[in-house]
Image (cartoon, coloured by chain):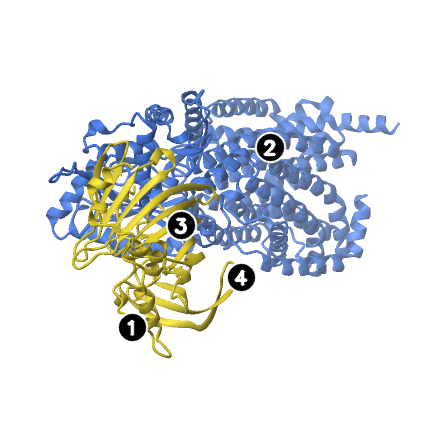
Chain colours: A blue, B yellow
C-alpha cells in the first residue's frame, strides 16, 4: 500500500505540487489576522439556554456591556476636575454608537424641598453638577454626591477621590466598530485629564478590546520570531540553506492552507485561533524533519533522487499518517466542546494537521528532488546520532532504574495534579503592571467593581409593582448584599424607596417601601414623568410591570467563584420569590462569561477523554497490536502527566487556555512514539536484535524527535514573552510537552521494551508474526 | 445613576396651553415668539414657520385625551387624561393642568404648570396617595412630556432666533390617512447651537391650514431620531385641530400615540381653574 502511494505521488508529483502552490497562493489572501471576532457569540451557542435568557434580558432591559472609565484624583471635587469631567462626558456622548453616559456631570440628585409659604414642600430634581463657579460650590457637590446612597460607592468612591464615567453603547452594532469607538473615547479622556488625575479603563468592552489587541499583538509579535527560530534551528541542525528554505516553503504552504480553510469553513479569527499558526508551524516542522532526514539518508545511500523520493514516502507514509491522524483526532476532540471558539480551534487545527500531512508527504519530497540537498551527514546526524544511540543503550542497560525514576516522577506529577486548581480570572491573565489589571484594582477597591450579573423576574403584568414584590426585592437585596464580593445591589425597589423618601420630607427613616399599591404606582409614575426617568426605569422594570431585574455588582475575581455566586444568588432568589408567581433567573453579561468559562473548563475534560480513547484506538489499529498500543499509552501519558503536574506545582490553574494543553499535548506527543515503534518493528522484522533495533530507532527517529523537540520547544517558548498569561502558559507548557515527549520516547519506550521481552522483544515479535502467517 | 424625575425644560409650552394637540404640533415644530404676518407671494421658509406659529388656536381649551405609550417590545400602556390649558396674557404665562383618570392606580393624579415668561416655570404635582401638592423643581432639558416620546421642548416651541430655515420642497404633497392629497411645504430647520440633541429637523406644513402634519428630527450624528405623524386633523370650533398623532422615537424604539376624544376651545377657563387648590380637588 505504502509503495503504491509512493509511486502514485511520484507520477503526479508536479501536478500535486502545482495544486498545492496555487492553493496556498489562493488561500493566503483569505487570511486576515487583523480582522478579529472575540464577540461573545463566538464563544457560546446562540441556542444555549443561558444565552437565550440573556438575549431575553437584553431585549427587555438593554445589555450590560459597558466601558468603565475610573478617574482618580485627590482633587476630584474641584472646579477644574468637575469641569474636565463635564467636558469628557459631553464629548463622549457625541461619539458614534454611544447610547448613554453616566457620570458625575450627568447624574441628577433628588432631594426634598422645605415647606415654603403655604405649601407642604416639594421635590427637587437637578443635575448634581451645575454652574460650579468656585471651590465652595465644588465641595457642595462632593457633599451631595457622598450623601446619595445610589451614587456613593457606585459612581463615586466613599472617600470622594475616585469617580466613574460609565459608557453604554448600541450593543447590536458596537462590536463592528468597537476598536474605533473605544479609541475615540481614550482620545477624549486622556488629553483632558487635569494634573494629578489618572484614568483607568475597564469594563467588558475594554476587556474584549484588550483581548483583540493582545490577539493581534501575539500574532504580529510572535509569528516572526517563531519562524526565525525555526529557520535558525533547522539551519543549525542541517547546516543547509537549501533544506532550510525548502522546509520553510513547505511549512508556509501548510500554514496558508490551514488558515485559508479555517476561514473558508466560516470560522472567525479570535484569541484561540491566534494559536493556530504557531501550532501548525511546529507540527509541520515535526513532519518535515522526519522527511528531510530520511530523504538525505536515502539519497546518500542510493544516489538517486527518485529512489530517495519513493523510499521516503514508502517508509514514512504510514507513520506520518498515523501520527497525523492521532494528532488530528486529539485536536478534533475539541470539537465536542460546547464552546464555539474551541470547536473552531479544534476543527481548524485538526484539518490543519491533515493538510500538513498531505503537503509534507506530497510536496516536500518533490521539492527535495527538484533542489537536491547535500548528502553529506548534516550536523544533527553527526552530533545527535551517536548520543541518541548511547542514551538508548543506557535505557536498555538501566531499564529498571529508568522505570523506577519514571514511577517516582509520575508520583511527583500526580501529587502536583492534586494541587491543580480550576480558575479563570480574566483580569489576572494580565500582568500586574498591565493597565487592565491596574484599572480593575482601582474599580474593585474604590467603586462597585468590574463584574456584574442580574436577576431577572418574570410574572404577570403588574406584578412587579405590588407591595409584596417590593418587599421580596428588598429581602433578596439584603441577602445578596451579604454574599462575599458583592458590592452593590440595585432594583426598582430602591427607586421607589428613594422617591418615597424625597416626597416625604427627605428623612432617612422614609427610605421605605410604601404600604399601598397606589402609593407605589404613583411614586413610580413620578419617576416616569421625565424621559430620563422613564428610560432609566425601563432598564429596571418592564413598562407593563411583568418583568423586572436586580443588578448585582461584584469585584473582579475568578469566574468559577462568580459562577458559584450566581448559582447561589439564583437559589436565594428562587427561595425568596417562592409562591409569588414570579420566576427569578440569574442572567446578565456576568452569567454569560462565567458560564462560558465553566463550559470551557468542564467540556475539556470530556474532550480529553475523547482524545484519549480515539488516539489510542488509532494506535491499536495502526500497530495492529494491543501490546504496542499499551506501550503507546504509557509513553504518551507521561508528557501529559508531567504537564499537568507541573501546572499543579507551579500554581498554573486549569483555565480557558491551559485546559486545552492536555488534549493538544496528547495529540502531539504520540507522533514520536509512532515513529519510534514503527522503526523498531520494521528493523526487528528485518532481522535485528531488540537492542540493535532500539539503538537504530533511537539514532534515526530519536534524532528526528530531538531535532523537532529543540526547534519546536524554542519556538513555543517564545510565547512565554506574551503579556497575556494564557498565551505564555500555553507556549511554555507546549514546549515542556515537546521536551518530555522526546524524553519519554528515548528513555521509557526502550526501557519498557527491554524489561518486557516477552511482549516487545525481537524474538517475540517475529514469533507472533510467524504464527499469524501460519 | 440618573435621578431625573420630573425636571422640565425652561422652554415654552405655549402650544399645549393654547390649543391642545393642535398646539402641541404647531408649537413643537415652530418656534415661539414668531411674529405675525401672512406670507406674501413666494414666502420665505421663515415666514411660513412664523405664520404656522401665529395661527388662531383659541384663548383656552379643554381636551379629553388618550395616550398610548408603546415600549420597545411593542407593549402598550394606556393613559386617559384631561388637559386644561389657557393662554397667558401680558406678564402672565400660559397655564396647563393635566389630570389622569386611568389607569386606576394613578387615577386623579394631577400636574400643574405655570409658565413665567421671564423666570423659571413653576410645576406642581398632586399624588392622591400622598394627599398633598408637591412643588417640582428642576432644570433638566429635553425632558419628556409626562413620560411620553414628546418632550417639553418638542411641544413648547423653540426660539425663532435659535434656528435657520430653508425650504426642502415648496411643492410637496401630503397624503392624509384617508388617501386625500394636500399641498404642503417641507421646511428644514437647523439649530445655530449644534450641541443640542436634535440640531436638524424637517417639517411638512399644510398650505391650506398651516398645520404641521409630519416631521422628522435628526440627531447630532444626523441619524433620524424622532418621527412625528398626524393621523387625523379636523376643524373644531373653527380651529384646525390635530386629533390623532403618533410619535416614534427611533433611538429608544418607543412610540407614543395621542388621541383627542373631545376638545372644546374658548370655554372660559380662569386662573382659578389652574390654582394649586384646584389641583388638589379630586373631581
Pointer 2 indicates a residue of which chain?
Answer: A
Label number found at residue B260: 3
Please determine if labels 1 and 4 lie on a single subunit: yes
- The residue that mark 2 highlights is A607
Helix, strand or loop at mark 3:
strand
Helix, strand or loop at mark 4:
loop
Marks 1 and 4, how far apart at CA: 32 Å
- The residue that mark 1 highlights is B37
Q: Is residue A130 left or right of residue A319?
A: left
- The residue that mark 4 highlights is B179
Label number found at residue A556: none
At horizontal 81% and vertical 46% (from top left) the residue drawn is: A3
Marks 3 and 1, how far apart at CA: 30 Å
As drawn, the residue found furthest toward the bottom would be B41
Tag 3–tag 2 contact (CB < 8 Å): no
Tag 1–tag 4 contact (CB < 8 Å): no
At horizontal 40% and vertical 45% (from top left) the residue drawn is: B66
Amino acid at each position: 500500500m505504502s509503495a503504491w502511494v509512493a509511486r502514485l505521488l511520484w507520477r503526479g508529483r508536479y501536478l500535486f505540487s502545482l495544486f498545492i502552490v496555487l492553493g496556498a497562493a489562493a488561500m493566503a489572501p483569505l487570511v486576515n489576522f487583523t480582522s478579529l471576532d472575540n464577540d461573545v457569540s463566538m464563544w457560546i451557542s446562540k441556542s444555549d439556554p443561558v444565552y437565550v435568557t440573556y438575549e431575553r434580558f437584553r431585549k427587555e432591559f438593554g445589555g450590560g456591556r459597558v466601558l468603565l472609565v475610573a478617574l482618580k484624583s485627590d482633587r476630584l471635587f474641584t472646579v477644574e476636575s468637575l469641569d474636565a469631567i463635564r467636558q469628557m462626558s459631553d464629548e463622549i456622548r457625541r461619539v458614534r454608537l454611544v447610547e448613554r453616559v453616566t457620570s458625575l456631570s450627568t447624574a441628577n440628585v433628588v432631594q426634598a424641598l422645605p415647606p415654603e409659604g403655604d405649601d407642604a414642600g416639594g421635590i427637587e430634581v437637578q443635575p448634581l453638577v451645575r454652574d460650579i463657579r468656585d471651590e465652595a460650590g465644588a465641595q457642595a457637590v462632593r457633599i451631595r454626591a457622598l450623601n446619595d446612597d445610589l451614587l456613593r460607592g457606585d459612581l463615586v468612591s466613599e472617600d470622594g477621590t475616585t469617580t466613574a464615567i460609565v459608557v453604554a453603547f448600541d450593543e447590536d452594532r458596537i462590536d463592528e466598530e468597537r476598536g474605533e469607538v473605544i479609541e475615540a473615547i481614550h482620545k477624549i479622556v486622556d488629553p483632558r485629564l487635569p494634573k494629578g488625575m489618572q484614568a483607568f479603563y475597564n469594563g467588558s468592552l475594554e476587556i474584549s478590546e484588550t483581548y483583540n489587541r493582545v490577539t493581534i499583538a501575539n500574532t504580529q509579535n510572535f509569528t516572526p520570531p517563531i519562524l526565525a527560530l525555526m529557520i535558525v534551528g533547522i539551519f543549525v541542525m542541517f547546516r543547509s540553506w537549501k533544506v532550510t528554505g525548502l522546509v520553510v516553503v513547505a511549512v508556509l504552504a501548510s500554514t496558508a492552507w490551514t488558515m485559508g480553510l479555517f476561514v473558508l469553513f466560516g470560522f472567525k479569527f479570535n484569541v484561540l485561533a491566534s494559536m493556530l499558526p504557531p501550532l501548525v508551524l511546529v507540527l509541520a516542522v515535526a513532519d518535515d524533519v522526519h522527511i528531510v532526514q530520511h530523504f538525505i539518508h536515502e539519497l546518500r545511500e542510493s544516489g538517486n533522487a527518485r529512489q530517495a523520493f519513493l523510499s521516503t514516502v514508502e517508509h514514512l507514509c504510514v507513520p506520518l499518517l498515523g501520527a497525523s491522524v492521532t494528532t488530528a483526532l486529539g485536536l478534533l476532540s475539541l470539537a465536542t466542546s460546547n464552546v464555539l471558539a474551541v470547536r473552531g480551534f479544534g476543527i481548524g487545527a485538526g484539518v490543519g494537521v491533515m493538510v500538513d500531512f498531505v503537503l509534507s508527504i506530497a510536496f516536500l519530497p518533490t521539492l527535495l528532488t527538484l533542489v537536491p540537498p547535500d548528502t553529506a551527514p548534516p550536523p544533527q546526524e553527526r552530533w545527535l546520532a551517536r548520543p541518541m544511540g548511547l542514551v538508548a543503550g543506557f535505557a536498555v542497560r538501566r531499564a529498571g532504574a529508568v522505570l523506577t525514576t519514571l514511577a517516582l516522577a509520575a508520583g511527583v506529577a500526580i501529587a502536583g495534579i492534586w494541587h491543580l486548581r480550576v480558575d479563570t480570572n480574566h483580569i489576572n491573565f494580565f500582568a500586574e503592571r498591565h493597565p487592565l489589571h491596574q484599572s480593575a484594582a482601582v474599580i474593585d477597591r474604590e467603586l462597585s467593581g468590574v463584574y456584574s450579573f442580574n436577576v431577572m423576574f418574570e410574572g404577570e403584568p403588574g406584578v412587579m409593582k405590588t407591595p409584596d414584590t417590593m418587599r421580596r426585592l428588598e429581602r433578596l437585596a439584603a441577602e445578596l448584599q451579604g454574599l462575599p464580593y458583592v458590592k452593590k445591589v440595585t432594583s426598582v425597589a430602591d427607586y421607589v424607596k428613594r422617591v418615597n423618601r424625597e416626597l416625604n420630607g427627605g428623612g432617612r427613616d422614609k427610605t421605605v417601601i410604601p404600604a399601598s399599591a397606589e402609593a407605589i404606582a404613583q411614586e413610580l409614575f413620578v419617576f416616569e414623568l421625565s424621559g430620563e426617568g422613564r428610560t432609566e426605569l425601563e432598564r429596571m422594570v418592564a413598562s407593563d410591570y411583568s418583568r423586572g431585574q436586580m443588578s448585582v455588582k461584584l469585584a473582579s475575581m475568578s469566574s468559577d467563584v462568580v459562577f458559584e455566586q450566581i448559582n447561589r444568588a439564583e437559589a436565594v432568589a428562587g427561595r425568596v420569590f417562592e409562591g409569588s408567581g414570579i420566576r427569578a433567573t440569574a442572567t446578565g453579561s456576568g452569567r454569560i462569561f462565567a458560564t462560558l468559562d465553566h463550559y470551557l473548563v468542564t467540556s475539556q475534560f470530556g474532550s480529553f477523554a475523547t482524545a484519549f480513547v480515539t488516539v489510542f484506538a488509532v494506535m491499536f489499529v495502526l500497530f495492529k497490536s494491543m501490546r504496542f498500543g499499551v506501550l503507546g499509552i504509557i509513553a504518551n501519558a507521561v508528557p501529559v502527566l508531567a504537564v499537568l503536574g507541573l501546572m499543579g506545582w507551579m500554581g498554573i490553574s486549569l483555565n480557558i487556555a491551559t485546559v486545552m494543553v492536555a488534549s493538544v499535548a496528547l495529540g502531539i506527543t504520540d507522533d514520536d512514539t509512532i515513529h519510534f515503534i514503527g522503526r523498531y518493528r520494521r528493523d526487528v522484522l528485518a532481522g535485528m536484535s531488540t537492542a540493535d533495533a532500539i539503538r537504530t530507532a533511537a539514532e534515526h527517529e530519536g534524532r528526528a524527535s530531538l531535532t523537532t523537540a529543540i526547534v519546536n520547544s524554542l519556538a513555543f517558548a517564545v510565547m512565554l514573552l506574551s503579556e497575556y498569561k494564557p498565551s505564555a502558559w500555553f507556549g511554555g507548557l507546549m514546549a515542556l510537552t515537546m521536551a518530555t515527549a522526546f524524553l519519554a520516547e528515548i528513555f521509557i519506550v526502550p526501557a519498557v521494551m527491554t524489561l518486557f521481552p516477552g511482549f516487545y522483544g525481537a524474538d517475540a515479535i517475529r514469533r507472533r508474526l510467524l504464527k499469524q502467517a501460519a | 445613576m440618573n435621578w431625573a424625575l420630573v425636571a422640565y425644560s425652561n422652554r415654552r409650552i405655549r402650544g399645549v396651553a393654547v390649543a391642545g394637540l393642535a398646539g402641541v404640533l404647531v408649537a413643537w415644530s415652530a418656534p415661539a415668539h414668531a411674529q405675525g404676518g401672512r406670507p406674501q407671494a413666494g414666502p420665505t421658509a421663515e415666514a411660513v414657520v412664523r405664520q404656522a406659529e401665529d395661527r388662531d388656536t383659541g384663548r383656552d381649551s379643554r381636551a379629553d385625551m388618550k395616550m398610548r405609550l408603546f415600549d420597545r417590545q411593542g407593549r402598550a400602556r394606556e393613559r386617559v387624561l384631561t388637559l386644561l390649558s389657557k393662554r397667558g396674557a401680558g406678564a402672565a404665562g400660559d397655564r396647563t393642568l393635566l389630570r389622569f383618570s386611568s389607569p386606576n392606580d394613578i387615577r386623579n393624579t394631577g400636574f400643574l404648570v405655570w409658565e413665567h415668561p421671564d423666570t423659571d416655570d413653576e410645576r406642581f404635582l398632586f399624588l392622591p396617595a400622598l394627599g398633598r401638592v408637591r412643588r417640582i423643581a428642576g432644570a433638566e432639558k429635553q425632558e419628556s412630556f409626562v413620560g411620553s416620546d414628546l418632550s417639553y421642548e418638542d411641544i413648547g416651541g423653540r426660539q425663532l432666533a435659535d434656528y435657520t430655515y430653508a425650504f426642502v420642497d415648496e411643492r410637496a404633497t401630503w397624503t392624509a390617512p384617508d388617501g386625500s392629497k394636500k399641498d404642503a411645504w417641507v421646511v428644514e430647520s437647523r439649530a445655530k447651537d449644534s450641541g443640542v440633541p436634535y440640531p436638524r429637523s424637517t417639517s411638512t406644513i399644510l398650505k391650506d391650514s398651516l398645520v404641521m402634519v409630519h416631521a422628522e428630527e435628526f440627531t447630532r450624528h444626523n441619524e433620524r431620531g424622532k418621527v412625528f405623524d398626524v393621523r387625523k386633523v379636523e376643524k373644531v370650533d373653527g380651529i384646525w385641530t390635530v386629533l390623532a398623532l403618533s410619535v416614534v422615537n427611533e433611538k429608544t424604539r418607543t412610540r407614543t400615540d395621542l388621541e383627542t376624544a373631545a376638545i372644546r376651545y374658548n370655554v372660559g377657563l380662569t386662573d382659578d381653574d389652574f390654582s394649586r387648590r384646584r389641583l388638589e380637588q379630586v373631581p
